Image (cartoon, rainbow, N blue to C red):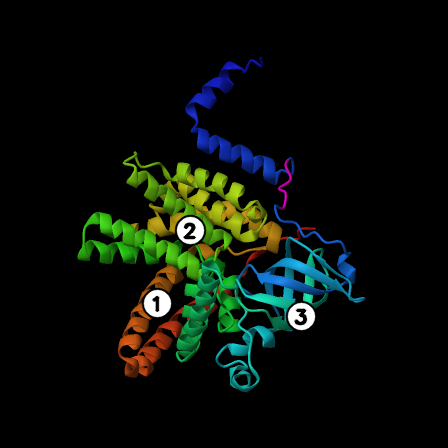
Amino acid sequence: MVKLPKWLKKLLVQVNPFVAAAAFCALAVYSGKVTVQNRDPFQSLFAERDICLLTGSVSSNPAKTQALGGSYRMDFAVESVATVNDARASARGQVSVLIPADIVESLYPGKVYTSSRVQGGILIDAGSRLSLSVTPGSKPHEFVASSVRALGWGSGISCRLRHFRALCRLQFRRILFTWGNAGGLLLALVSGSREYTEGIVSDSFRNAGLSHILALSGMHLSLFSGLALFLGKKAASRTVADGLQLGAIMFFVWFAGLSPSLFRAMLCTLILFASSLLRMNRPSGVTVLSVSFLLHLVIFPGHAHTAAFMLSYGALAGILLVSANVKRLFSRRFLPRLTSALSDSAAAQLFTAPVTLRLFGKLMPVGILASVIVSPLVVYFLYAGLAGLVLCLALPFLSPAIGAILNLFYELIKNTAVFFARAKGVTFDPS
């Protein structure tokens, strides 16, 4: 039997076991001592260089990238493959596929929607079954699609739900398209789709250290759940309000998709909801984050080394662990109302700085102040957009007026982000 030193025994007794377990796992994973295995690796009888056809289903929302002149990237669950010699075999696992924008956007308004009404477009979203003509990409388990053939959505309940979700997301794009640039930003904030977001806005948010605002995360989830809780309390009892809040959380995650940061936010919310339902003492924020981290690694281990995962957990850990200490520094120099926001922003950037420098080679300290100013503007813009959307569905003739108001709001957000993006950052060469 191994005897532990007294100081280590005392430390293990005093430290929260969930926090200790999360810290140990994080140290093991990110020090390279433990390799996170892919649970669903791509497996085929043929070498990837010989494969020319993939058959399977889309397992993630297609996301616009800068690769190959603006293609979309999506995860694809492979069911079968074929080679140039017409040899066919079953396969399994996930691959990454780059697909031309004109194929993905064949039904999108303002893209090639007009021509697709005559020629017929393909609805590509999570759940759609496709046959892809491909060539190997530049990375392992990556392919580049040249043509696509739709294979339907299946007949089961889950298949029909995925098809319904894809249709809802498509219709949502068409509604917001009438609001121009403001609709494009609202679409990015609600569904994570950025194909209608102005390039100058995306670049300015990134260069000003505000990328987290466009990435679906806890801020967006808390807005929807908070709104549902508020309406539930006004209309019924607290139990009904809690049920509406949980329903709003699950609906938003279902509609937007399971990005690492959004899944982290959902886990934290569900842990708090479960503790309240079971009449347990409310756990501390650090405990909730630690349990969420451990569950996340078990459910989606492949997320561990993604930027969204590391930045999401790092930012929240910074806020929970050192924000109070940073607040004491700011309280002597800034207005009291700004102290909390500034300390949270500084603590988040402090903990995510190593990851940001390692992955992107640049750090924007101005993001501390920019986040304090732009985040509230985005929150009000999001609430105004959702309220305007409800009004337009009830009274369609109000759409032009609401769109004009939202675009004024949008210009304020855009110009503010552009202003902060002009500041110089700290550069670092990862090599």
Question: Residue at image x 29%, y 83%?
Answer: 397
- Write down the residue under mark 1: 381
Q: CA distance from mark 3 to mark 1?
A: 33 Å
Residue nearest the observer in this picture, 79 or 167: 79
- Which residue is at the front of the view, 80 or 21? 80
For label 3, the residue is 68
Q: Earlier in the sequence, mark 3 or mark 1?
A: 3
Q: Which quadrant of the view contains residue 332?
A: top left
* Disc 3 and disc 1 in contact, CB within 8 angstroms: no
Highlighted range, magenta: 34-38
Q: Position of residue 398 (x, y in %)?
A: 28, 81
Vertically, is 7 above or below 42?
above
Q: Residue furthest front?
A: 155
Please name the residue that numbered disc 2 is placed on.
345
Q: Which mark is residue 81?
A: none
Most common SS among magenta residues: loop
Q: Give the SS element for disc 3.
A: helix
| Amino acid of disc 3 | Leu
Query: Residue 389: x percent and y percent?
Result: 32, 72
Say whether disc 2 or disc 3 marks the residue closer to the N-terminus: 3
Query: Horizontal placement of 95 versus 270: left or right?
Result: right
